[in-house]
Image (spheres, grey):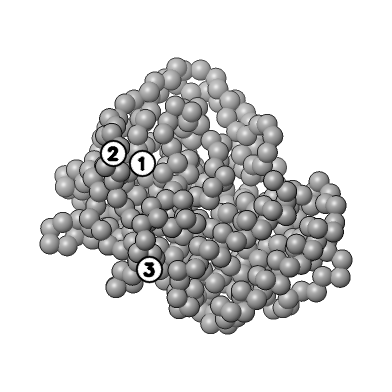
Amino acid sequence: MSLLKSYQDIRKRSVEICKPLKTEDYVVQPIVDVSPPKWHLGHTTWFFETFILKPFAFEYQEFDPDFNYVFNSYYETVGARVIRTNRGNLSRPGVDEVYRYRKYVDEAMVKFLEEVNLTEAQKEVMILGFNHEQQHQELLITDIKYILGHNPLFPAYSQSKLIPVLSFETQDLEDENQEIQHPEFISFKEGVYEIGFSGEGFCFDNELNRHKVYVYDFSICNLLVSNKEYLEFIDSGAYQDFRFWHADGLEWVKTNQIEAPMYWHKIDSEWYNYTLSGLQLIQAENPVCHISYYEAAAYASWKKMRLPTEAEWEIAARNLNWGKRWEWTESAYLPYPGFKKAEGAIGEYNGKFMINQMVLRGASEATSPEHSRITYRNFFQPDLRWQFTGIRLAK
Ligand SMILES: [Fe+2]
């Protein structure tokens, strides 16, 4: 597919994700981790304006010189910016203006892509921009879910069961025709394996270099932990039992009075969860979702097992059914041997976050199409659970 076609398709998808929103939904920031949808739409546009149009497009006129301050996320190289917690306080630029900004930049990008023969370096930045926007598409879905799912009225993102732009069902329904699968542990032999990206195509810098790892005999479950299994953990009183928790995890449980996954609500002694179609009864066989690392690790400990390391996960991936939940691993997010940061702002993309975060592997239902691979390293702080995160056991 041409770069132009990819550009147009990816940009269109972000707008389509926002179509069911009301204007007010675009603006709020209920917690620091959740950015207003309006900000995501502006920030992804800013990325192309800042890293393609301003340096490379002849005679390009910036849409608004003040937008760099508003839509720069974390790039120190590119200057000062609005602090993250204040993204939701920006009533201006308005939603209409942000859409005008997108249109203006899109027109300039189309002209640029039609008229210029891109160098290899420019192509690399373009493709990084595509992947960046796809990452923000997943954040748009998870942030919209948080905004609506924490509204006391629990409004649905959509009443229709399947929204074409999201490749998954918004209702948390079980597929009645699907055979119930039984968990099985797949064993792997002790030895030297290789992990990390190699070959053609795009990867993020944090997937490099491909390198050798030594692992001991291990086995890993073919399935993710289900809601039904997680309910047993809740019902056993494990949230109140210090034996299963890291010290930080127990502190987090107590401080925040956690007693179930995010979006779970007990109503008349039945568990419901908020889905993009509104509040629904928990579906027993579906993989549990919106789990923190602390909860994933405590669940594994309660089962007298553990979470896989990221190396184990990658070694086993071809034998696993993955892609529904981001799977917490036992691995801290650290550079691979030989990891190099790019020069300039792009070098700030991943490397500077390699502290105090855990690696998640796989992908989720909310991940953009063609944005997953077995070497992909996602990462979040251990208390965060607004992404579509789940649990896979290893031993
Ligand atoms: Fe970003």
Residue 391: numbered disc: 1
Q: Is residue 240 left or right of residue 168?
A: left
Q: Residues within 10 Å of mark 3 (few under 14, many from 20)?
A: many
Q: Amino acid at mark 2?
A: Asn
Going from N to C along the chain, the mark reached first, 2 or 1, is: 2
The x and y percentages for residue 139 are: 50, 59
At x 23% / y 45%, what residue is drawn?
A: 284
Q: Residue at x 47, y 55 (%)?
A: 164
Q: Quadrant of the C terminus?
A: top left
Residue at which label 3 appears? 148
Which quadrant of the structure image shows residue 84? bottom right
Which x, y percent locates residue 22? 45, 75
Q: Secondary structure at mark 2?
A: loop
Q: Nearer the viewer, mark 2 or mark 1?
A: 2
Q: Residue placed at 16% from the left, 56% from the top?
A: 270
**SS category of the residue bearing label 3:** helix
Label 1 beta carbon within 8 A of ligand 1: no
Q: According to the image, label 2 marks what residue? A: 177
